Amino acid sequence: MSCKTILVNLDIDGPVEPAIEAARDLAARLQATLIGLCAADARWPIVAADGGTLAVEVWQRERDEIKADFRKIHATFDRLTVGFGNTEWREVLDSPTRALAGVARVADLVVMRAASGAATGDSARAAAPSSVILQAGRPVLVMARGGKQILLNKVVITWKDTREARRALADAVPLLAVAGEVIVVTAAAVIEPWIRRGIADATAFLARHGIRARAETIKGSDESARLLEFIAASGADLVVSGAYGHSRLRQWVFGGVTRSLLDKTDINRFLSS
């Protein structure tokens, strides 16, 4: 397992420098190609019935402004990655969420900022991490709010014997291989023997990839709360977790731990679905 390509999403309203610098430094550690992406959509204005011509003019003016912003952000990306190595640039006039989920096909890992947590305030100007995680088919690393780097001194993996957790564990191997300390933690009301076997198998899987990890089991009726308490007390630089959700009236609703992690904007989060 390796990470050869990192795609960093850059919201058009910025700031873009922290995301570029953090993704660049991570790509350097993993010896990966770095691709920068900026996407935004021109919204159709609301006008009176006889204002069709004016609407087109306003719409075209917004498209022109977006293209000008693309050029500025591209120049910033080039400036901050000069001499880095393999880089690419992409810009898309479309919904940022849809564009990011589509371009993710070229990458092993998506890096993005999300100052507002799971959702986004303006779907035409910023990608929503909740939707990207479920649509991209790639692991997504959501940076901490205000963060300028992605440290890997201590990584906590929230474990549950599910498809999503197994996927996240495997997807995170390239990052875990360069981490200083790795902890696999699970919480349950009763720590049954099968739970201990599952977490032991997870750490054994990592060991076969040269990653030394220790296991922690937490007993508690409120599993989500217990895990979040452990993460807060651990001083982790990064949390790795499966993303759990289900469809309700064509909208994705996340489970407790996943939603809480997405809204916990003070820490870097690595999620796979």
Image (cartoon, rainbow, N blue to C red):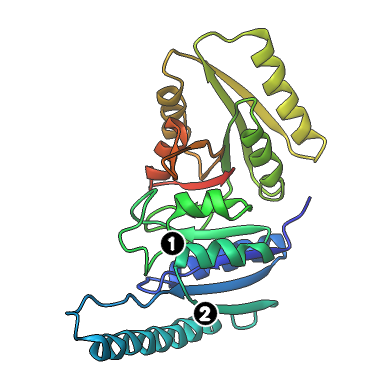
Q: Nearer the viewer, residue 210 or 180?
A: 210
Q: Nearer the viewer, residue 196 or 271?
A: 271
Q: Position of residue 57 (x, y in %)?
A: 29, 91
Q: In this rendering, is residue 196 above or below 64?
A: above
Residue at 62 percent across and 8 percent down: it is 192
Q: Position of residue 185 (x, y in %)?
A: 57, 26
Q: Tag 2's secondary structure?
A: helix
Name the N-terminal-most of marks 2 and 1.
2
Q: Position of residue 67 (x, y in %)?
A: 43, 87
> According to the image, label 2 marks what residue?
77
Q: Nearer the viewer, residue 147 or 244?
A: 244
Q: Is residue 109 left or right of residue 174?
A: left
Q: Which disc number belongs to residue 225?
A: none
Residue 35 lies in quadrant: bottom right
> According to the image, label 1 marks what residue?
127
Q: In this rendering, is residue 162 above or below 238?
A: above
Amino acid type for the residue under numbered disc 1: Ala
Residue at 62 percent across and 36 percent down: it is 164
Q: In this rendering, is residue 76 above or below 262?
A: below
Name the outermost residue toward the left. Answer: 48
Q: Tag 1's secondary structure?
A: loop
Judge the density around disc 1: few (<14), some (14-19), many (≥20) Cα neighbours within 10 Å.
Answer: many
Q: Position of residue 267 (x, y in %)?
A: 44, 46
Please name which of the two marks, 2 or 1, marks the residue nearer to the observer.
1
Judge the density around disc 2: few (<14), some (14-19), many (≥20) Cα neighbours within 10 Å.
Answer: many
Position of the C terminus by quadrant:
top right
Q: Is residue 216 left or right of residue 146?
A: right
Name the outermost residue toward the right. Answer: 208
Q: In this rendering, is residue 48 above or below 110?
A: below
Residue at 67 percent across and 22 percent down: it is 199
Q: Is residue 165 left or right of residue 58?
A: right
